[in-house]
Amino acid sequence: MNIIDSFAQYLSKEVEKNPEAARRLLFFGWRSYLTYMKLRPDRKLPPSRRYLERTVMGEVLDAFSDPGHSCMCSLFVPGEPLAAAGIHPYSVEALSAFLAGTHVENVFTNVTGDKGVPETMCSFHRVFLGAAESDLMPRPPFLIYTNLACDGNMITFPYLKQRFQVPAFFIDVPWERSRESVDYVADELRRMTAFLSEQTGKTITGEMLREAVSRSNRASSSYEKCLDLMRSRQIRTGMTAEMYGIFVSRILSGSKISERYARLLLRDLTAAGPMHAVKLVWIHVMPFMQPSLRALLNDSDSVCTVASDIVSDGFRVVDSGDPYRGMAERMVYSAFNGSTTARADYALSLAKRTGADGAVIFSHWGCKTTIGASGLIKEALETEHIPALILDGDACCPGNTADGQIRTRMQAFLEMLEERKGAEKA
């Protein structure tokens, strides 16, 4: 048994006996690991990826240790108003991913199972709800959530509002992608900003919000250049770093963290050597704790994940002169809103832009939207001669995934892509 499993075993016992002590222990463990990362960084990763891992972890720890200046929110809430207000946001996916990384996710899925939460619900949400039921997480001052991309939010956040007895704000994003929908969401975001000001006691001026949007635009401009460089430049990466990329393009958009990460990534790619690896586009979340995929994809010279739709879709340049409308357009015209065709089209455009050799569509446990869309996305890619593999699994609870089957299918797919790439060169 390694040190993480020993820590998880002890923590599991503490959760049942003394949630407050378990919280302190968990925070100590995470803070110790963050210190270790700073002192002994993974030199195999480029500076941008190392910065991303330690900084996002630090941001979540700040939210966890200082709940009075934090916000519990769903992943697709625009980060610019939060950045303007000086709020540390943390999402369902962020906290659940950290718990999974500590190997205690099953403790909390067992709690929700005992409470009658169906196993068919997204495991990120089940872990998060279990942590709330176990009194592991501190009481947040308020909640902000949206129906965009994830239907689990419509169960999780109303429940948490009732459990914690705190104010909550809901951003309703219409399914229709239209000018009227943009106008409607822009008004919603104006009310969200007023809600933030009321809850924090801090006035968020138009200038503060425009500056936050300008920061996210600078990050997006850098990231757009990165996508183009990914066609021909290769840097090492890891599944955990790819997972962290979701947060800087979503709830941390508009922050200095997001802007600096994109700038560092652009610098790393500009200085990188030529691309020789098989290039993958990843569709949906990264199962960063899955042993077989970690062995195949982490720190690999032969395989490179060049882009992920859930990350790159968040890096969109918007109108900073009218920040509310700009943020609203990003939400309404997100690849994760509207018909499945829009998502398939976006996946195809991302694969073509990066010159991907193939795509992996991860059909995450409980995510009905992606499960339903996976076949259409695969068809759209393969119609344009881009091979695609659908993997069924659980991005949060690796024990729910048939690891041997994943390994076999992924290895066969990568071998096919390598042969195809070699034949094209010949």
Image (spheres, rainbow, N blue to C red):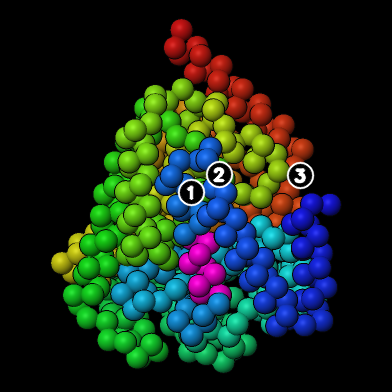
**Is residue 314 found left or right of 207 in the rendered image?**
right
Task: Tell how many labels.
Answer: 3
Question: Of the residues shown, which amino acid type is indicated by label 1?
Answer: Arg
Which residue is drawn at the image coordinates 41% and 36% (left, top)? 351
User: Is any part of residue 380 visible from this angle?
Assistant: no
24 inside magenta stretch: no
**Mark number, residue 50:** 1
Cβ–Cβ below 8 Å for labels 1 and 2?
yes
Q: Which residues are magenta?
A: 56-64
**Mark number, residue 237:** none
Callout 1 secondary element: helix
Callout 2 secondary element: loop
Residue closest to the far front:
39
Inter-mark Cα distance, 2 to 3: 29 Å
> Going from the N terminus, do you reach mark 2 or mark 3 first?
2
Q: Position of residue 398 (x, y in %)?
A: 71, 52
User: Where, by quadrant of the figure, is residue 32 drawn?
Assistant: bottom right
Q: Which residue is mark 2?
A: 42
**Circle 2 crowding by C-alpha within 10 Å: few under 14, some 14–19, many from 20:** few
Which residue is drawn at the image coordinates 41% and 61% (left, top)? 250
Q: Position of residue 123 (x, y in %)?
A: 66, 62
Q: Which residue is mark 3?
A: 402
Q: Position of residue 216 (x, y in %)?
A: 29, 60
Which residue is drawn at the image coordinates 70% and 57% (left, top)? 397
